């Protein structure tokens, strides 16, 4: 009797699984064959930056050259639209899919700016946290460290991770942003033609000759010693420049 009961139970489970699989397959076929009635935009990182909003993304989808509304979702060239959306440098990633209601879901992740490149004779640009150079927006201004000076090469690279100098600058920006004190104190980094960096501080008046963006932890420790031990005793306005390039010492003028 126990064996017969076990067999019946297994048969019922198998039938239930088969029925569930049929419903899933039916739902998938229904979804794939449904006509797109509307486009629903979902933005990640919207609370952090507003370079693009839902209307902007909707405009990009509708202007992609691919038919969407009134077309069967399984016939929409989703990958092509995703590719075209990512031509916009503000967009880090895009994923499109249809739901059971006939909506085309457009999920977009925006890039986050970590620095702003400033120029007197050309438009500004932002450096995103993945190193990509992206244009500024009339809708939103991010409060980030400024990068000035010889920045033409940075803009031409379009991605700081493509060059060793760009990677070093990225590491310096990330180091500054990771520390609350330095993030508040460092107002601008000026890149010289020889690749060396000058720091313009927010509060103290001394220009900081940082040298090449390397040995970051050691140099910033020396600068902190200068702020904590030298300026309070010698006077906050006594020095105009401080040089961190020399090993084991701080040179102030």
Image (cartoon, rainbow, N blue to C red):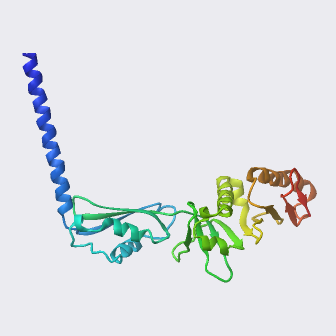
Q: Residue at x 18, y 64 (%)?
A: 34
> In terms of image quadrants, where is residue 251?
bottom right
**Residue furthest out toward the top:** 1
Q: Could you say where residue 39 lies in the image, as x and y percent from the top left?
A: 30, 68
Q: Residue at x 46, y 72 (%)?
A: 88
* Left or right: where 62 falls relative to 70: right
Q: Could you say where residue 160 lies in the image, as x and y percent from the top left?
A: 61, 64
> In terms of image quadrants, where is residue 104?
bottom left
* Left or right: where 197 falls relative to 39: right
Q: Is residue 153 above or below residue 12?
A: below
Q: Could you say where residue 55 lies in the image, as x and y percent from the top left?
A: 39, 73
Q: Residue at x 74, y 50 (%)?
A: 217
Considering the image in quadrants, where does the N terminus appear? top left
* Left or right: where 32 falls relative to 200: left
Q: Could you say where residue 156 lies in the image, as x and y percent from the top left?
A: 61, 74
Q: Is residue 44 above or below residue 67?
A: above
> In terms of image quadrants, where is residue 168?
bottom right
Considering the image in quadrants, where does the C terminus appear? bottom right
**Residue furthest out toward the front:** 163
């Amino acid at each position: 009797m126990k064996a017969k009961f076990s067999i019946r139970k297994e048969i019922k489970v198998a039938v239930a699984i088969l029925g569930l699989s049929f419903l899933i397959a039916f739902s998938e076929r229904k979804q794939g064959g449904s006509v797109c009635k509307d486009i629903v935009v979902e933005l990640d990182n919207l609370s952090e930056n507003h370079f693009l909003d839902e209307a902007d993304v909707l405009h990009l989808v509708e202007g992609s050259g691919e038919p969407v509304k009134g077309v069967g979702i399984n016939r929409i060239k989703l990958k092509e639209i995703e590719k075209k959306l990512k031509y916009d440098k503000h967009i880090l990633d895009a994923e499109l899919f249809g739901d059971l209601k006939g909506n085309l879901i457009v999920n977009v992740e925006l890039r986050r700016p970590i620095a702003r490149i400033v120029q007197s004779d050309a438009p500004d640009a932002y450096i995103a946290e993945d190193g990509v150079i992206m244009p500024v927006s009339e809708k939103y201004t991010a409060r980030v460290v400024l990068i000035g000076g010889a920045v033409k090469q940075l803009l031409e690279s379009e991605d700081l991770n493509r060059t060793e100098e760009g990677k070093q600058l990225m590491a310096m920006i990330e180091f500054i942003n990771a520390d609350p004190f330095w993030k508040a104190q460092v107002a601008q980094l000026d890149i010289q033609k020889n690749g060396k960096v000058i720091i313009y501080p927010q509060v103290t008046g001394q220009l900081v000759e940082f040298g090449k963006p390397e040995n970051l932890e050691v140099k910033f420790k020396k600068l902190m010693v200068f702020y904590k031990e030298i300026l309070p005793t010698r006077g906050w306005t006594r020095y105009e420049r401080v040089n961190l390039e020399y090993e084991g010492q701080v040179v102030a003028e």
